[in-house]
Image (tube, helix red, strand yellow):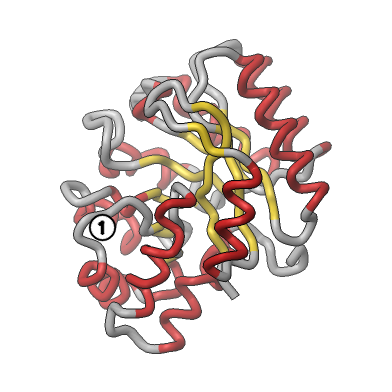
Amino acid sequence: MIIDPHVHIGHDTTFESNRTEDEVYNKMKEVGINAAIIQPAQFVTFEDYKYCHNRIYDFHLKHPKEIFGMFSLNPHWDVDLYKNEARRCVKELGFVGVKLTPLTHIANAAVKRTRLPFEICRELNVTLMIHQGLGIPFSLSSTFFDLIREFNDVNIVLAHCGTMDNEDEAIVLAKEFDNVFLEISVRTPNIRNIKLFVKEIGSGRIMYASDSPTEMAHVIWEVKNSGISKEDQENILWKAAAKAFKLERRL
């Protein structure tokens, strides 16, 4: 079993990528991924995000036990617009998480609007994934310390484990808070660090992810060749994501 909790679809206006449902699903089948959580690419209008949320829902309907959705929207936009779309995605479309991307959402952890994703996750009882690393200072793991402590009833996934220059901060947060999970996509080097993460916090809160169909096979290879036990590999490849996003009964 392998779960990929971090995959985008849509034409990304920040990175000029354009991932399609067929590309994602075909690559999943090719490399042996059993389920994935799909989120929108980076857009500049509410209409584009809503359209992509609907695309993700249609994708889920075609593959109800393999494809799940994650809500994403800039918290600086209208508060009611944000909350209502999040509620629609979770309550009506069955989405399992919320994404905050400080890089493109310009989300400073010290300002009021950055509380919004945390508050809506608490209200809807879903998991918050936070992009980390690229986009410093807003993407520094340590800046979210106070919010994570306040919202310690919300599962928090730190995407990319903070990336190479921020991984120590991500490890500190995971050690400090039991609700923090580390996700290992888009990291270079990665293979030796996976072993470090397991040593520091245990494999139960470390999860595989790709961030892109082109990286799916590569990160699986890294996990399987990192020198960790089969049990640790299983935790990373699917059990941690299933726990964090409450997927056990939906697979």
Amino acid bearing label 1: Val
Relative to 161, residue 38 above or below: above
The residue lying toward the viewer, choosing from 126 and 145, is 126
What residue is drawn where x is 73% and y is 34%? 89
Quadrant in the picture for the C terminus:
bottom right
Relative to 210, residue 133 above or below: above
What residue is drawn where x is 47% and y is 34%? 100
What residue is drawn where x is 67% and y is 48%? 96
Query: Regarding mark 1 in the picture, which secondary structure is present there?
Result: helix
Relative to 102, residue 225 above or below: below
Q: Is residue 22 left or right of residue 181?
A: right
Q: Which residue is mark 1?
A: 172
Instruction: Write down the quadrant of residue 216 in the picture.
Output: bottom left
Residue 58, percent from left and from top = 78, 39
What residue is drawn where x is 42% and y is 45%? 148
Q: Is residue 232 left or right of residue 18?
A: left
Residue 153 can be seen, yes or no: yes
Quadrant in the picture for the N terminus:
bottom right
